[in-house]
Image (spheres, rainbow, N blue to C red):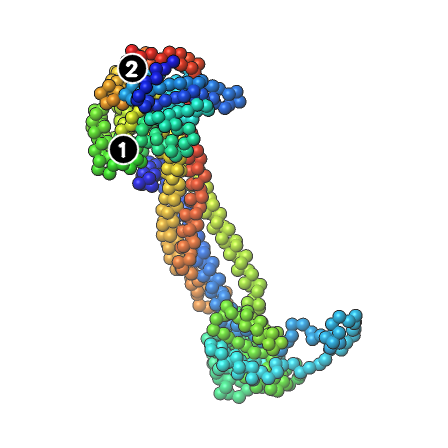
Amino acid sequence: MNVADAGETPVIELRGVTRILQETVPVTLVHDIDLIIQRGEFVSVTGPSGSGKSSLLYLLGLLDLPTRGQVLIDGVDTSGYSSDRLADVRLAKLGFVFQFHFLLPEFTVLQNVTLPMIRLGRLDEKAIRERGMALLRDFEIDDQARKRPDQLSGGQRQRVAVARALANDPAVILADEPTGNLDTRNSEIVQGIFADLAAAQGRTVIAVTHDQDFASSAPRNVHLIDGRIDSDVRR
Amino acid sequence: MFWGVSMGIAAAQLRYRRRQTIVSTLGVALGVGFFVATSALMSGSEKDMVQRLLDNAPHITVKDEFRAAAPQPVFIAFPEGAIALSSTKPREYLRGIKNHGAKVEELSRQPGVVAEAALMGQAIIRYASKDASAGIAGVDPEKERFLTTIESDMQQGSLMRLRTSSQGIVIGQGMAVRLGLSMDDLATVVSPTGLVRRMKVVGIFRTGNLLLDEGQAYMLIKDAQVLLDKPFIANRIRIKIADPDTAEDIAAQLESRWGYRTESWQEVNRDFLGLFIIRNTITYSIVGAIMAVASFGIFNIISTVVMEKRRDIAILMSMGFRAGDIERIFLVQGVFVGMIGMVFGWMLGLVLLQMLGSVEISVPGLMDTQKLPLEKGPFQFGVGGLFALVSAVAAAWFPARKAAQVRPVDIIRGAT
């Protein structure tokens, strides 16, 4: 199903990943998925509602654990990692953008963006502020830095969320319907940002979307049906 | 660094919900404040009462009695024997502590010890055709000054005048009023053996204790010995020691050595001291209930916040915050509320103590008003503060653990 690119270690690899939700009637969210994502790829994940695209994203992002199978990050199997260790991997290597911005209402825009950096503790206070401002500048929202999230428009908030996802310079950006809650114009802006992240900055971007326009802007598209990969197309 | 960011988030959330924070902090502050005030009042009054007990009476009293009747010699000779004795006639013996002079002298040699041989008995005091029965205490005025506070309770005359006047007697004010006696009057004292003596009132005291004021009379021990027809006899050795807390042990030692029933002040006042325990239990359970209510308040607020903040928790976790970081965020809020509450509680406590300290109460039977006895020690503040912190942390603990158990996927899946 997948092309095994020999030589280079894939940034994320799924091996026979199955996720079953243990309810009164067990629900299989994704079934026996093998997927290799290389560094710098921009992958869109599509599929009808309930096809397991979000579940797949959470598994890729170590937010959820597979019932069976393995998730490898930079070639290292993460099965058996403690939840703290998984959190550390997320902190340093992965960045999330969700349909809803999920910004913390108590903090200013700048504070929201710098939070992951403070938690990582790799930079000093001054450098963290500078990097935070630089990220906001990249998305043309540096003039909003002192405002609180509820004073921003939807498009601005989503850009702050993207800036926050990029805070610790992660190799992979995982996005779950990032344009799902935006109007056309803002959708286009965010879409552009994602394309740029992959093309210009060489980051791996994996975006779940039902927006055909957005999906087709990605060079690779994974289509899911009923928790299985229906097609995996590179353009 | 990790602590720093958790504290930052905690502080931001507290600031964001300023009103709830203030309310829960006030709850803790009230608890601490009232704890400090009631505890100061309770332990103050307890100390005050114990001090009165210690001042008003000797620490240890040796009596010319035995705790148990002496066993019949036949029982000592045949401890295993099947012996029964009935209708034995108890031996009459001369009451009094044998060789009391030597005993008192020996006790007095110990540092910080005041010992006095005294003779206690009963008599009737008669004046102007009126009778009053009185407990007679034959004492040594020099030593009595140290043993009880009677000397400082004198309204007229003094205990020391017993030595300078012959046949002197010191009575309480209650009795003086009842019999119409005043200073330097000659009262008739009738002993149970029928002896009648005329004695001069050389002092009138008022302790505030009705029993003493109406029914106690003091005289020199030699006068009492004559009156009660017990020459050279003392039936009490009254002892004051340096450290009242050791009275029980010393009393036990003396009793096992001399055989006489020896009572410490703790033994005499056992009921009274038992009351303190009950009183303290009641007080501290009420104050504890205040703190419990305050900590339920904290629990309630932090639980609500955890419920409200599930999305934020989820996003923080997806960002790479560990479960421990999340737990800390909410635990810190509890600690913070506890600490601020503690400080405000201390201030409230100080204000309450100031107010209580200015209250003047008049005790029935006493003319002069009294201030409430308060103990403003570090103990009250320390325990109150500790109480606040422990209950705040305990209250925050459960919701914080709950927050740490949030599974981000569940929240994010539900939201999108």
Q: Quadrant of residue A66?
A: top left
Q: Quadrant of residue B190?
A: bottom right
Question: In percent of the image, x 45 and y 18: which residue is there?
Answer: A31
Instruction: Say left or right for B400 vs B211.
Output: left
In the image, which disc is placed on residue A114?
1
Question: In percent of the image, x 25 and y 36: which residue is there?
Answer: A123
Residue A102 showing in the rendered view: yes
Residue situated in front as seen by the camera: A152 or A17? A17
Q: Callout 1: few (<14), some (14-19), or many (20+) C-alpha neighbours within 10 Å?
A: many
Q: Secondary structure at mark 2?
A: loop
The label nearer to you, 1 versus 2, is: 2
Question: Quick check: B305 above or below B269?
Answer: above
First in sequence, mark 1 or 2: give its number.
1
Q: Callout 2: few (<14), some (14-19), or many (20+) C-alpha neighbours within 10 Å?
A: many
Instruction: Say left or right for A66 vs B192.
Output: left
Q: Position of residue B211 (x, y in %)?
A: 56, 71
- What's under tag 1, amino acid-wise? Thr
Q: Secondary structure at mark 1?
A: helix
